[in-house]
């Protein structure tokens, strides 16, 4: 498959999914957009293997194993030509890896997190949850930095904080959806401390104890966003605007969750078109 067509397919995949942050948006430098789309498509499909549909855990893990095998083949310079989305994704991804000398460990970390989604439904401590975020979200930020020409420990650290914040916001936003799959990402140490009962959530009862637990979770999330905020001032050009909009989008969802007392059974907050104007103004006024 010609790389140009492969990148076009990745951009199409990126446009089909809602996220709390812009994906390969016009804010990014034009040259970076197809490469970010390739990474997103690779991660999005793998995440869907772990989450979507009615597959058994065994079937999900088999699909993820197959995705890892295709990644290893790509790293070795071989693309499986089968006319599938997978061929397009790995054709584009292989080209991106070679152009920017991307660290394969970052891509493999994503796959390890998706496997964990299949195998782990509870987290005892915040440290355990942060370790998951280190692999499920943080590699994306670092890969975007690499594509944009940055290899800097401080930028990586700020990026990790923002990416972890975005991942945590998504957990609290999707509390109801995840529980339908018997997953709970609020660490059990916080659940226990608040005196919350998981059965209340199963029966769609959002109690004061759960509000207390999510209030603590939101405070830890906001701390990550605050720590990572300097990332947008540490880079140049259009990437600065992209990272500002990403940060503001995540914080906007967190603010909405707090305003409704974290009760996602009543309303699941998302970013809407009217938010774009506000985020745009705040991006400029940063």
Image (cartoon, helix red, strand yellow):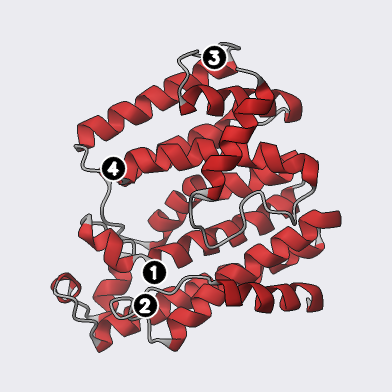
User: Which is more N-terminal, label 1 or label 2?
Assistant: 1
Residue 214's label in the rendered image is 2
- Nearer-the-camera pick, 121 or 67: 67
C-alpha gap between disc 4 and disc 3: 27 Å
Residue at 47%, 18% in the rendered image: 83
User: Which is more N-terminal, label 3 or label 4?
Assistant: 3
Q: In what element is the residue under mark 3? A: loop
C-alpha gap between disc 4 and disc 2: 24 Å
C-alpha gap between disc 1 and disc 3: 38 Å
Q: In what element is the residue under mark 1? A: helix
Residue named by callout 1: 172
Residue named by callout 4: 118
C-alpha gap between disc 3 and disc 2: 45 Å
**Image location of residue 238, percent across then percent down:** 81, 56
Q: Nearer the viewer, mark 2 or mark 1?
A: 1
Q: Examine the rendering and report whether any part of residue 184 can be seen.
A: no
Residue 265 lies in quadrant: bottom left
- Nearer-the-camera pick, 207 or 270: 270
Could you classify mark 4 by the number of other residues whose Cα lies within 10 Å: few (under 14), some (14-19), or many (20 or more)? some
Q: Nearer the viewer, mark 4 or mark 3?
A: 3
C-alpha gap between disc 2 and disc 1: 7 Å
């Amino acid at each position: 498959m010609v790389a140009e067509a492969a990148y076009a397919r990745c951009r199409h995949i990126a446009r089909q999914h809602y996220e709390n942050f812009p994906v390969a948006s016009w804010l990014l430098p034009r040259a970076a957009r197809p490469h970010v789309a390739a990474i997103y498509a690779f991660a999005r499909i793998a995440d869907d293997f772990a989450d979507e549909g009615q597959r058994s855990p065994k079937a999900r893990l088999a699909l993820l194993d197959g995705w890892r095998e295709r990644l290893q083949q790509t790293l070795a310079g071989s693309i499986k030509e089968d006319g599938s989305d997978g061929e397009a994704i790995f054709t584009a991804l292989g080209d991106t890896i070679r152009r920017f000398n991307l660290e394969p460990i970052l891509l493999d970390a994503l796959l390890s997190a998706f496997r964990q989604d299949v195998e782990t439904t509870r987290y005892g401590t915040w440290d355990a949850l942060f370790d998951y975020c280190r692999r499920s979200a943080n590699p994306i930020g670092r890969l975007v930095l690499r594509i944009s020409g940055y290899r800097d420990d401080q930028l990586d650290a700020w990026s990790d904080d923002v990416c972890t914040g975005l991942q945590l916001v998504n957990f609290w936003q999707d509390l109801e959806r995840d529980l339908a799959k018997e997953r709970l990402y609020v660490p059990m140490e916080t659940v226990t401390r608040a005196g919350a009962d998981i059965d209340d959530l199963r029966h769609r009862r959002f109690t004061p104890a759960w509000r207390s637990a999510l209030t603590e979770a939101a405070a830890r999330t906001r701390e990550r966003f605050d720590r990572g905020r300097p990332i947008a001032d540490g880079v140049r050009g259009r990437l600065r605007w992209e990272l500002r909009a990403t940060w503001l989008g995540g914080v906007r969802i967190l603010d909405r969750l707090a305003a409704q007392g974290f009760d996602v059974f009543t309303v699941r907050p998302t970013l809407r078109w009217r938010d774009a104007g506000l985020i745009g103004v705040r991006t400029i006024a940063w």
